[in-house]
Image: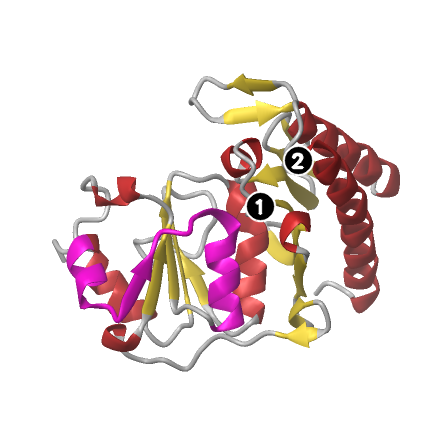
Amino acid sequence: MTSLVDLTRWRETALSICDEADRIAMAGFRRDIAVDTKADRSFVTEVDRSIERLARERLRAAYPDCGLVGEEEGPDAAGATVCWYIDPIDATANFVRGIPIFATLLAVAVEGELQLGAVSAPAMRERWVAWRGGGAWRGDQRLAVSRVSRIEDAHLIYGSERLRDGQLPGLGATLAAAWRDRGFGDFWGYMLVAEGAAEAMIEVGAHTWDWAAPLVIVEEAGGRFTTAAGERRIDGPSALATNGLIHDDLLRRLDASR
């Protein structure tokens, strides 16, 4: 079992890194910065690289034996007992286009079990953090998922219209049955679930560094986080985060072949 001392130290480290990452991000936001296109056609900027480099240096200095998994520089000793996940700018496309919905994501796992997650969105002036047994927080407000228990009354969020292209065969009918649906995407959809502003976030095609911090925050707010096949993992092809009450029904509906 992870000690409170470790959790507190990791939280302080993550928030300190987020403070500096916020300053770097805002210094480059809506400025003329270098933008490159990666092989998967996603963007990477000098700001992404600077933040990840900062995070790696800080984490290596504080925890020399830890593993690191980052979006821009890949894995380093990822099989270590303690492993950190780094997404320097989640929603880089938003950042590049001057849209304020972007964030730095940090999370730490012990023997594969995620223990702490932090999401810092400086242009939105918001920050979320959660740790095992300590709850999920936005600033000084403790978060809790909603109590909506029917899809017909639910607000569903999905990451992209690409979800409609057969990856989740029941998605169209599910969204049609819901009270409301929106395509917010990226970290923010998960935070809205944790805050109780939405009942589910549905996404495909992201990566461990995208999903590590949201998993902890959603679960500590009282929700559930699995793949669309119902597996509790962050290295699968999809993610489904809900308030828990509609989770099983949503799994059934999304896979229309069941």
Q: What residue type is disc 1 on?
A: Pro
What is the crowding at mark 2: few (fewer than 14 residues within 10 Å), some, or many (at least 20)? some
Q: Nearer the viewer, residue 93 or 173?
A: 93
Q: Position of residue 158 (x, y in %)?
A: 35, 53
Which range of residues does the magenta coloring cover?
172-196
Residue 19 included in the magenta stretch of the image: no
Q: Main secondary structure of the magenta part?
A: helix
Residue behind mark 2: 29
Q: Position of residue 193 (x, y in %)?
A: 46, 66
* Alpha carbon distance from label 1 to label 2: 9 Å
Q: Position of residue 241 (x, y in %)?
A: 42, 61
Q: Which residue is at 17% across, 49% downward? A: 169
> Cβ–Cβ below 8 Å for labels 1 and 2?
yes
Q: Nearer the viewer, residue 159 or 131?
A: 159
Residue 19 in the figure: left or right of residue 252: right
Residue 191 included in the magenta stretch of the image: yes
Q: Which residue is at 68% across, 32% downward? A: 77
Q: Tell me the quarter of the image containing the N terminus.
A: bottom right
Q: Tell me the quarter of the image containing the C terminus.
A: bottom left
- Please tell me whether mark 2 sits on a helix, a strand or a loop: loop
In the picture, residue 143 is in which quadrant?
bottom right
What is the crowding at mark 1: few (fewer than 14 residues within 10 Å), some, or many (at least 20)? some
